[in-house]
């Protein structure tokens, strides 16, 4: 597997302006070294493994008093004092400008904000979109700010587009460290439940995510800093939304669940949509086709996590549900902005290697294993 550093790749843009200042909110981001100067994990010093850019101000915690958050989730170092010891609160990030993140569906909405946030953290971001003009228009202003962002066309529902993208990434960039599977569609209004476009929804949200993930798996750098996949999913696809007992049993059986069984479940749903029997078969009640697509993404994530772990691969895979967010998908309705979601999503994607879980579902700010749901 070829893994030439991204710094040698021809697409690397020369910053038009000086590197961006550390991110705005001092409460979320401690004074930072420029991540482009920071060595990968393995650097010595008291802050080893901690990520200065990702330190969360504990003052946000009272908002979630009932939830016992694991240390990894909080990004807090084992010894908070050590952070102050290390050059006035400065710790080293595990990533650098040579760390490559690929974000799908990043021309708008949550995907665009996540791509921008990762680039602001100092990574090289491959911003992808299915439409060339819309993608380039989304990437250009980020590049104008001096961020290392390159646009590449990618339609996750098109196998030829996925294959072409994987070949380009291999030959031009050399590999990747982070994949954010964000691209998705829904054709439902907030208060409707049509399955008219079920096939497109399943092809994009589930099969597209799986197709791209499998195509890029050989290209992940197996560096000391574990590579990571973050699937932007939805709580609409959690097991507690499934009312069909045999379906619940299938999805809950950790030992026997396979990718083949997940695909069979999806085919069963699509067949029931075709013959008009889906409504009485215990599928999730809200945004049913979309919910089934995310149910499949969640289950695939769990199976893939187990597969990668048992193969000794240094690649983690987790799900993140941003919750009800104001984007085009919700026609502007929602509890939070795409930027707020991106702040948090980027921190999840950048968890310190030693504290990165796998096979976990993060529901907004609450980490939950879906096997428990
Ligand atoms: N907003 C919410 O409340 C909410 C809640 C839970 C989960 N989510 C999840 O968050 C993610 C982002 O959603 P969003 O709210 O930001 O939606 P959005 O504003 O509708 O953006 C969706 C993005 O996906 C792209 N896309 C669609 N089909 C594609 C394909 N075949 N190939 C490549 N890109 C494709 C779209 O590109 P075009 O511009 O070309 O259409 C667009 O860039 C999705 O996975 C969604 O399921 C959202």
Image: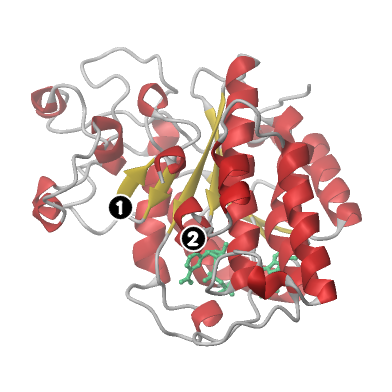
**Image coloring type:** secondary structure
Q: Are marks 2 and 1 in contact (CB under 8 Å)?
A: no
Quick one: SS at disc 1? loop
Residue 322: x, y in percent?
A: 42, 61
Q: Is residue 323 left or right of residue 102?
A: left
Mark yes or no: residue 154 visible: no
- SS under mark 2: helix
- Residue at 41% x, 46% y: name it: 373
- Where the N terminus falls, by quadrant? top right
The percent position of residue 113, horizontal first and vertical second, equals 47, 64
Residue drawn 69% across and 75% down? 134
Residue, disc 2 = 241
Q: Which residue is mark 1?
A: 365
Q: Please state the horizontal and vertical placement of residue 252, each as a whole percent of the image.
A: 54, 39
- Mark 2 or mark 1, earlier in chain: 2
Find out if the beta carbon at label 2 lies less than 8 Å from the nearest ligand 1 atom.
no
Q: Quadrant of residue 10?
A: top right
Q: Residue furthest right?
A: 160
Alpha-carbon neighbours of circle 1 within 10 Å: few (<14), some, or many (≥20)? some
């Amino acid at each position: 597997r070829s893994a030439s550093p991204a710094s040698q790749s021809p697409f690397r843009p020369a910053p038009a302006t000086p590197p961006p200042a550390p991110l705005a909110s001092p409460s979320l981001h401690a004074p930072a070294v420029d991540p482009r100067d920071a060595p990968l994990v393995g650097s010595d010093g008291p802050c080893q493994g901690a990520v200065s850019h990702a330190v969360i101000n504990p003052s946000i915690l009272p908002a979630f008093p009932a939830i016992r958050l694991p240390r990894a989730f909080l990004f807090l170092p084992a010894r908070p004092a050590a952070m102050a010891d290390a050059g006035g609160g400065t710790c080293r990030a595990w990533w650098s400008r040579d760390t490559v993140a690929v974000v799908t569906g990043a021309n708008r909405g949550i995907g665009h904000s996540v791509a921008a946030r990762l680039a602001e953290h100092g990574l090289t971001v491959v911003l992808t979109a299915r439409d060339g003009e819309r993608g380039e228009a989304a990437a250009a202003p980020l590049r104008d700010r001096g961020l290392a962002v390159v646009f590449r066309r990618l339609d996750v529902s098109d196998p030829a587009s996925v294959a072409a993208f994987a070949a380009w990434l291999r030959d031009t960039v050399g590999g990747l460290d982070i994949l954010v599977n964000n691209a998705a569609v829904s054709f439902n209004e907030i208060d409707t439940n049509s399955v008219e476009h079920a096939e497109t929804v399943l092809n994009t949200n589930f099969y597209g995510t799986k197709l791209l993930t499998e195509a890029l798996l050989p290209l992940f750098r197996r560096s000391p800093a574990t590579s990571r996949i973050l699937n932007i999913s939805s709580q609409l696809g959690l097991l507690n939304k499934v009312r069909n007992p045999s379906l619940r049993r299938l999805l809950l059986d950790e030992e026997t669940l396979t990718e083949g069984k997940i695909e069979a479940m999806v085919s069963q749903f699509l067949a029931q949509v075709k013959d008009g029997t889906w409504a009485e078969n215990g599928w999730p009640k809200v945004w049913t086709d979309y919910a089934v697509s995310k149910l499949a993404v969640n289950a695939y994530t769990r199976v893939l996590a187990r597969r990668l772990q048992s193969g000794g691969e240094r690649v983690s895979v987790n799900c993140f549900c941003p919750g009800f967010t104001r984007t085009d998908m919700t026609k502007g309705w929602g509890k939070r902005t795409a930027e707020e979601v991106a702040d948090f999503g980027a921190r999840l994607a950048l968890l310190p290697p030693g504290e990165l879980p796998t096979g976990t579902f993060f529901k907004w700010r609450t980490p939950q294993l879906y096997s428990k749901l």
